[in-house]
Amino acid sequence: MDIKILFLILVPLGTAFLIPFIDLINAKLRRFFVLLGILLESYLIISIIINNYQSLKSGDFFLQYYLGGWQPPIGISLAMDALSLVFAVITALSLFLIVIYSIGYIGHHEGKYYVLYFLIAAASMGAILTADMFNIYVFIEMLTITSGALIGFKRSQEASAAAIKYLIYNVLAGLLFFLGVLLIYFNLGTLNMADISQHFASLESGIQLFITAIFLTAILIKMGVFPFLFWLPKSYDTAPSPVTAVLSGVLSKVYLYIFIRIFWTVIGFKTLEALNLNILLLDLALFSSFLGHLFALQSDNIKRLLGYSSIGHIGMITAVIMLNTEAGFYGGILHIISHMFMKAGLFVACGYLLQYTRSHAYRDFKGVGIRNRSVFVAFIALLLSMIGMPPLLGFASKWYVLMAFLEARSYFGAFIVIFGSLTAVIYYLRYIAKGFEEIKLTEDDLKEEIYSRPLLSVLYREKIVSFITYAYTAIIIGFGLGFRFFDLPLRMSIESVMNVERYIELVLGG
């Protein structure tokens, strides 16, 4: 057993609960304590990689921890294979960067913000590492409540309305997920994912279909895939930029992980095929991607545009994974990594640039590139990566997604990849051109602009926010040039997904 995987959950959870007590002692210590918590989380991830480097190279990597010492299927266990390691690493890295960014961005109610943030970090790690279906539900509900509170963090009427809408959809999804968990327990008498995987095929086809449909509906709502996509863009528009970076960059990827884990490890892709759900889901995902890019094309609000763009990319990722081929998983997981850094980077860049605008509307984006050239250049690089321009990371991931569709002779899927890139050229270039337009500000305009951006009035805050934007841009450029770095972890992840029998043996056999 390796207790470090337990501490990946306990460290952010403990940090969240201790922050209010730190505030009571001395509020100035809060930032030091926040940094300590996220650095300790990063240390745990790095030490796991270093200590298990040989098993990673040989493809035998697997860690497990039994809560209370009770072995599965009776006890609850945490399990980390290659797939969960990849998701844990990219989640921890993105959360680390967003925490640093938040120190430079969040002004009022910073203590409350960090409590919610670290609860999200704990729930994200818990959802990735747990081997128990009920605990996935618990962590999903933690994510829903904490992210809903962050969406309404500004306490404006629009933010409150968006948070309520978000909670309605996501609580409904959580209830459906809980119903699926109950049905599994009543029919199989177990909640351990490996144990369920062994016996799910023995259920009657009608019960299999009902349980599968419930889980599908719940997770499609969480991911924002058609027909459950209309709650998402409003949430991105009203939330602070660090929150939208978490929603799009982290939470959507956690739900993709849950999607893969449930429908390949627990229920099994063969069940989806037997129930004729695989083709339906593939078509829904492709149509969702098409709609996302189409809505982004007509959007006149930069944050909503990025939200609709996320719908397009999540739909494309879901579709290519549904091909159930090695090429599909290679392209899909690589684009999950790529999209996590691209979209989080875009939202943190927006958080800087939108301090210089009256609103998020297209007309008010005029001239921001002239006044903030270096950050705007980084913003452009991230946009070009989203489009799929070489040699950026977005090009490499989109290329493998396109090749996977062509290899599977899914020509509509290949069309969606190309369509998404071409429409992205149009809707992103509009904002790039608008940002470089000349603008003449009157004295009243300057006063209103300065009043509207008090958060970056301190020089060190501005430096931190801009630095994190550059960091995300450097990741996209660096890994775009060296995307082969991901080859080994991607192939190990594919093996973890496709070789379900090995996962069952390791979880149940120790």
Image (cartoon, helix red, strand yellow):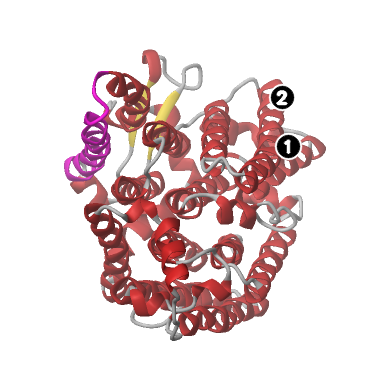
Q: Is residue 47 magenta?
A: yes
Residue 339 visible somewhere in the drawing? no
Coordinates of residue 508 in the picture (x, y in percent): 45, 28
Q: Quadrant of residue 465?
A: bottom left
Residue located 52% across and 43% down the image: 154
The majority secondary structure of the magenta stretch comes to: helix
Coordinates of residue 94 in the picture (x, y in percent): 35, 51
Residue located 32% across and 33% down the image: 8
Q: Which mark is residue 245?
A: none
Q: Say few, some or many: other residues with alpha carbon within 10 Å of mark 1 (under 14 / 14 to 19 / 20 or more).
A: many
Measured Cα–Cα span from mark 1 to mark 2 = 10 Å
Coordinates of residue 242 in the picture (x, y in percent): 42, 50
- In this orientation, which residue lies closer to the viewer: 35 or 141? 35
- In this orientation, which residue lies closer to the viewer: 132 or 128? 128
Q: Is residue 69 above or below residue 453?
A: above
Residue 476 visible somewhere in the drawing? yes
Q: Which mark is residue 211?
A: 1
Q: Quadrant of residue 375?
A: bottom left
State which quarter of the image contains the N terminus: top left
The residue stretch that appears in magenta: 25-51
- Marks 1,2: beta carbons within 8 A: yes
Does residue 185 appear to the left or right of 153 in the view shown?
Answer: right
Q: Tell me the residue that label 2 is attached to.
A: 187
Q: Is residue 329 above or below residue 419?
A: above
Coordinates of residue 381 in the picture (x, y in percent): 36, 76
Residue located 75% across and 60% down the image: 280
Q: Is residue 128 above or below residue 299?
A: above
Mark 1: secondary structure: helix
Residue located 27% across and 66% down the image: 470
